[in-house]
Image (cartoon, grey):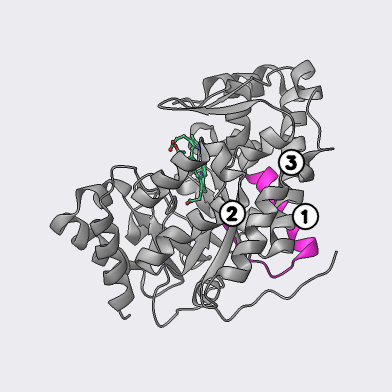
Amino acid sequence: MTNKKIRNDKLLIRALNGEITERVPFWFMRQAGRYLPEYMKLREKAGSFLDLAYNSEFATEVTLQPLKRFNMDAAILFSDILVIPHALGQELAFRKGEGPVLTPVNNIMTLDALSMDGMHDHLSPVYQTISNLSKKLPTEVTLIGFAGAPWTVATYMVGGRGSKDQAETRLMAYQDRETFSKLIDLLINSTSEYLIKQVDHGAEALQIFDSWSGSLPADEFITWCVEPVQKIIENIRRVYPNIPIIGFPKGAGAKLKNYIKKTKVTAVSIDTSMSTSWVRSTIQPLCTVQGNLDPLLLVSGGVALEKAVYHILDHLKDGGHVFNLGHGIIPQTPTENVKLVSDIILNYRR
Ligand code: CP3
């Protein structure tokens, strides 16, 4: 595998690497999606969410849609964290109003039925989307690839669907540690290969989503969130030593400090619950932070929204900062509010 040079002069890459940039770069988690009428139109045409995600031509267009309206500094590959279990052979469907539904992998038999053999063939449309995007994106825009962290992906694989407390998966981790470890190892290996391939095809930064890391006790957080992500990052950096990697252990709270030190992420995404003054004093000295506007403020709009945006910009201006939300954009979000926030950030000077 060639060790290709990663461009490091783009605004977002410079900010991720710790530079206090002249302007704060920004993008929004789930910036491509249902709040955009042009997205709904293309999803309709594709038939289903998965048909859209696996159609490189459509996925390329969907990735570019938000940039045409709001001038973000990054495009995030349009795909989903659940394409990995799908590529390993687990059945997956997205049903309207229900979210993802998978045939549970919760014992050694169902786990042993999975395999990495056909994985890259299955994922080839995703790699094609990345190649298309790296040709089409404006030169100053950064292309972000992503994957789910093993713990979060495992919660969907074991439970067979999303859940509020991830109880089934936590139970499996306690009751059948050996099988659960084997599942996590499979996810470490497949996710490492997947992310390396994304960089091979043109991803310039990576984000690892651990949306459910907040549901684990402290020791288990180390075992199932920190260590797997640490291994994935070691594997990627062996091939791409300079690729910026953003970790997002949502709900980690004070455990974020140790997460940063152990995993050696380049930057962290911070969720809505974290106070910007704590982030400024405790996290920003360790690495660049990304965040953390409440997605509901983007739905609400008005004075509350403007105040919150300036509050975040003012509080985090003296360290590495990428403006983002604390979680993904909500489908009910009015596009005018996204435009308003984008314009504030584009005009703000530190
Ligand atoms: O951010 C982006 O614009 C890139 C695309 C992206 C999607 N999912 C597209 C998507 C990314 C980065 C994800 C990550 C993802 N997927 C996560 C981690 C981040 C988070 O939100 O916590 C998780 C947990 C998933 C799993 C998943 N995918 C769920 C639970 C759902 C259903 C809930 C929902 O919002 O509908 C999805 C579906 C999904 N993934 C949609 C999109 C645009 C909506 C599908 C549709 O069009 O109906």
Q: Residue 303's quadrant in the figure? A: bottom left
Q: Helix, strand or loop at disc 2?
A: helix
The type of residue carrying mark 1 is Asn
Number of the front mark, 3 or 2: 2
Q: Position of residue 117 (x, y in %)?
A: 84, 37
Residue designated by label 1: 235
The magenta segment is: 226-246
Total number of numbered discs in the rendering = 3
Q: Helix, strand or loop at disc 3?
A: helix
Look at the image and tell me in which quarter the C terminus lies. bottom left
Please say whether residue 232 is one of the residues in the magenta stretch: yes
- State whether residue 74 is above or below residue 166: below
Q: Are marks 1 and 3 in contact (CB under 8 Å)?
A: no
Residue designated by label 3: 122
316 or 147: nearer the viewer: 147
Q: Is mark 1 within 8 Å of ligand 1?
A: no
Q: Position of residue 318 (x, y in %)?
A: 38, 75
The type of residue carrying mark 3 is His
Number of the front mark, 2 or 1: 2
Q: Is residue 327 left or right of residue 225?
A: left
Instruction: Give the residue displayed 34% in from the left and 59% down from the top.
Output: 276
- State whether residue 252 is above or below residue 257: above
Which mark sits nearer the N-terminus, 2 or 1?
2
181 or 294: nearer the viewer: 294
Mark 1 surroundings: few (<14), some (14-19) or many (≥20) residues within 10 A: some
The type of residue carrying mark 2 is Glu
